[in-house]
């Protein structure tokens, strides 16, 4: 349920109403816009007398929220959420480029790539330390040592880092990581999501291989229900009957998620297509579709990459993508 307060409602009046609602064992999410304040009521709202609430002088309207996701819902939070990492802003009209190798392989590799993507305009460095792989015999990542190398790359370039967590037992290793990624295979690992919700670290939440947008938002809700509202949604392609590409990139998800939720949405064209030659046009399409950012795999020697070399761009190719994306942003903003 949401209650929209009338313009001119004082802080004291709002606090008094919030206290009254909390006495009914409800959590109240307050979203203050430039002209309107929205109270989101979370819990068993059946005990709330809607007619009584509507009759209050300070209340403009009262509505029930039919969608199962509440805190991630734009009705609860009309303004775009902006995630802040140092001087980097994600969402709310800002455009963020995340780039780096699929997996961290060596100190020389990750620092060389980090320097290259920064020079081309990347804002955040990605790199896998823990790698969920379909085959148990494939390279599984450098794990804790990989995170240490990412931290060295951050020190060398100043770029914030994002890397994927697979198990909550390793959370301590992520203490100095700027953004924790939840991969597609863990999107519905609800125990993991709840534990991440107890942190205040930004979480980059990838859509599952065959999950609906509502399921993605419900996963975000698991994190938010524990108190962490710093969530970035990521469309990375879904599994369909088409086999030419690794996955099918659902660009309509960008518009739909912006309509349904206030959370920022980035697109990963690398995992979506699985082919380096298709990354540039899909990155441009995602930008034109209104994404809040793109996430691209870049390797200094893709043919020798230990993981996903076929979809990785060279630093030169990445530089060309950044140039095209900037031109599109100039045209649409």
Image: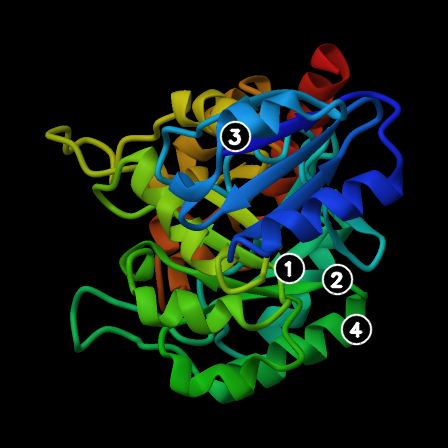
Q: How crowded is mark 2: few (under 14 residues within 10 Å), some or many (20 or more)?
A: many
Q: Residues within 10 Å of mark 4 (few under 14, many from 20)?
A: few
Q: Position of residue 133 (x, y in %)?
A: 25, 67
Q: Which mark is residue 125?
A: 1
56 above or below 217?
above
What residue is rendered at 34% in x and 49% in y?
310
User: How many angstroms separate mark 3 from mark 2 (CA)?
Assistant: 21 Å
- Ranked by sequence position, the earlier of labels 4 and 1 is 1
Q: Where is residue 200 in the image (x, y as percent from the top left)?
A: 64, 67
List the residue tagged with mark 2: 159
Q: Which mark is residue 289?
A: none
- Furthest-top residue in view? 331
Q: How crowded is mark 1: few (under 14 residues within 10 Å), some or many (20 or more)?
A: many
Of residue 178 and residue 104, the one placed in the foreground of this image is: 178
SS at circle 2: loop
Of residue 290 and residue 122, the one placed in the foreground of this image is: 290
Q: How crowded is mark 3: few (under 14 residues within 10 Å), some or many (20 or more)?
A: many
List the residue tagged with mark 3: 283
Q: Can residue 4 be seen in this view?
A: yes
List the residue tagged with mark 4: 156
Comparing labels 4 and 1, the label whose residue is closer to the camera: 1
User: How many angstroms separate mark 2 from mark 1 (CA)?
Assistant: 6 Å
Asked if residue 167 lies left or right of residue 94, the reply is left
- Ranked by sequence position, the earlier of labels 2 and 1 is 1
Q: Can residue 235 be seen in this view?
A: no
Quadrant of the image for the C terminus?
top right
User: How many angstroms separate mark 3 from mark 1 (CA)?
Assistant: 17 Å
Labelled pair 4, 3 in contact (Cβ < 8 Å): no
- Ranked by sequence position, the earlier of labels 3 and 1 is 1
Labelled pair 3, 1 in contact (Cβ < 8 Å): no
What residue is rendered at 63% in x and 66% in y?
201
């Amino acid at each position: 349920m949401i209650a929209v307060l009338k313009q001119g409602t004082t802080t004291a009046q709002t606090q008094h109403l919030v206290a009254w609602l909390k006495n009914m064992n409800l959590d109240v999410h307050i979203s203050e816009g430039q002209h309107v304040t929205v109270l989101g009521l979370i819990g068993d709202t059946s005990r709330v007398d809607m007619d009584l609430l509507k009759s209050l002088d300070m209340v403009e309207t009262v509505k029930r929220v039919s969608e199962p996701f509440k805190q991630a819902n734009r009705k609860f939070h009309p303004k775009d959420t902006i995630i802040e990492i140092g001087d980097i802003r994600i969402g709310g009209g800002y455009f963020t480029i995340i780039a780096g190798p699929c997996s961290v392989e060596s100190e020389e590799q990750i620092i060389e790539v980090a320097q290259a993507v920064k020079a081309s305009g990347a804002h955040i460095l990605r790199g896998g330390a823990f790698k969920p792989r379909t085959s148990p015999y494939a390279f599984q990542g450098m794990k804790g040592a990989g995170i240490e190398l990412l931290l060295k790359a951050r020190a060398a370039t100043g770029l914030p880092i994002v890397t994927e967590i697979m198990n909550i037992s390793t959370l301590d290793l992520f203490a100095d990581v700027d953004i924790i990624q939840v991969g597609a295979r863990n999107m519905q690992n609800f125990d993991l999501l709840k534990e991440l919700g107890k942190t205040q670290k930004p979480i980059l939440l990838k859509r599952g291989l065959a999950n609906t947008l509502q399921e993605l938002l419900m996963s975000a809700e698991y994190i938010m229900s524990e108190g962490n509202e710093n969530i970035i949604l990521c469309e990375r392609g879904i599994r369909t009957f088409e086999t030419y590409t690794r996955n099918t990139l659902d660009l309509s998800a960008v518009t739909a998620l912006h309509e349904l939720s206030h959370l920022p949405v980035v697109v990963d064209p690398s995992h979506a297509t699985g082919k380096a030659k298709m990354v540039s046009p899909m990155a441009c399409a995602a930008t034109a579709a209104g994404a809040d950012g793109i996430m691209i795999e870049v390797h200094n020697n893709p043919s020798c990459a230990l993981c996903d070399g076929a979809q990785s761009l060279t630093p030169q190719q990445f530089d060309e993508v950044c140039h095209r994306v900037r031109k599109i942003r100039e045209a649409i903003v």
